[in-house]
Amino acid sequence: MSVEIETLHYQEYRSSLDILLQQRRAKLRGTVRVETISGEKSYFDRIGPKNAKKKTTRHADTELTSTPHDRREVSSSFYYDADLLDKDDELRILGDPTNRYAQNSTFALNRAMDDEVILAMFGDAKAGKTGQLTVTFPVAAGNNVAAGGVGMTTDKFKEASEKLRAFENDPEEEAWWACMSSKQLKDMWGQTEFISRDFFEKTLETGISPAPFLGFRIKVSERLAKVGSDRVCGFWAQSGMLLGVNMDIEIDIGRRRDKHNAIQVYAGTDIGSVRMEEKKVIKVLAQE
């Protein structure tokens, strides 16, 4: 028996790269108003409600009522992700990993879009002619549903729906959305009123409800903020949140001569988000 046969043993290496678990899609991009913007700042003008006047006499003079005007500012921020693959790395590995690098960078930028929307949902909004005014999210009960020491419940859905309707949001004008973490969705699946609806059978698989529950379609995100033991969930009318896209995701793969001809994988996007109207957004706290 040859004692040198072991020198012929070989090890198998895969030429493919597996991308580890992570959020890959921009979950909230399809739940908000998306507009193309340009420059560092963009402005969106709005007009407010007025009360009609009742005519009480014949041939009376026409009384004019000034139309309220204001605007919201969107400031864009540039996000990017880049990495290098050295020339000697290319010679020492199997396959070409640049495509996987580009995919991984795209996933990171998609998550940045969600973060922009989540931050703007309850953060300060800039208003006024040049964005000189700061509009904070209301602390009044009309825009908030308290945690109440419990997780997500059907009663919180009902309360959020009641508040949006009280603000005269039209449920048929835009989609209504509810964003929560997987823990809140688990809370909901423990409630008979929720799970008895047969069109929710695929909610856990996709993170989005095939049909509304009390007017809301559900998105699941683990990126929502926590305050103490409470998860900060958002319930909103689609037109109430805006994502401005100055530059959509672009990928550039090329040689870097200043880095010994290494391949650089570069991905970037320029985006910003703003809450367009406080009466279209409800903050719902759920104990987690």
Image: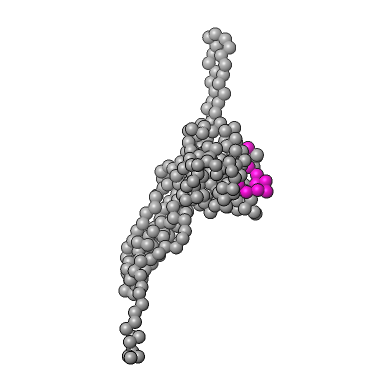
Q: Residue at x 50, y 39 (%)?
A: 212
- Which image quarter: residue 82? bottom left
Q: Quadrant of the N terminus?
A: bottom left
Q: Residue at x 47, y 51 (%)?
A: 205
Q: Nearer the viewer, residue 199 or 217?
A: 199
Q: Is residue 138 left or right of residue 28?
A: right
Q: Position of residue 149 (x, y in %)?
A: 68, 48
Q: Nearer the viewer, residue 24 or 39?
A: 24
Q: Residue at x 52, y 27 (%)?
A: 67
- Which image quarter: residue 261? bottom left
Up-down relation of residue 168 to residue 26 (above or below)? above
| Residue 144 is one of the magenta-drawn residues | yes
Residue 274 visible in the displayed image: no
Q: Nearer the viewer, residue 12 or 1?
A: 1
- Farthest right residue? 149
- Farthest front residue? 1
Q: Which SS does the magenta portion mostly show?
A: loop
Q: Residue at x 56, y 47 (%)?
A: 189
Q: Position of residue 47 (x, y in %)?
A: 51, 31
Residue 71 visible in the displayed image: yes
Q: Is residue 104 left or right of residue 47?
A: left
* Colour mapping: one colour
Q: Position of residue 25 (x, y in %)?
A: 44, 52
Up-down relation of residue 211 to residue 78 (above or below)? above
Q: Position of residue 224 (x, y in %)?
A: 55, 51
Counting every numbered tag in the picture gives: 0
- Farthest top residue? 58
| Residue 145 is one of the magenta-drawn residues | yes
Q: In this picture, which residue range is highlighted in magenta? A: 142-152
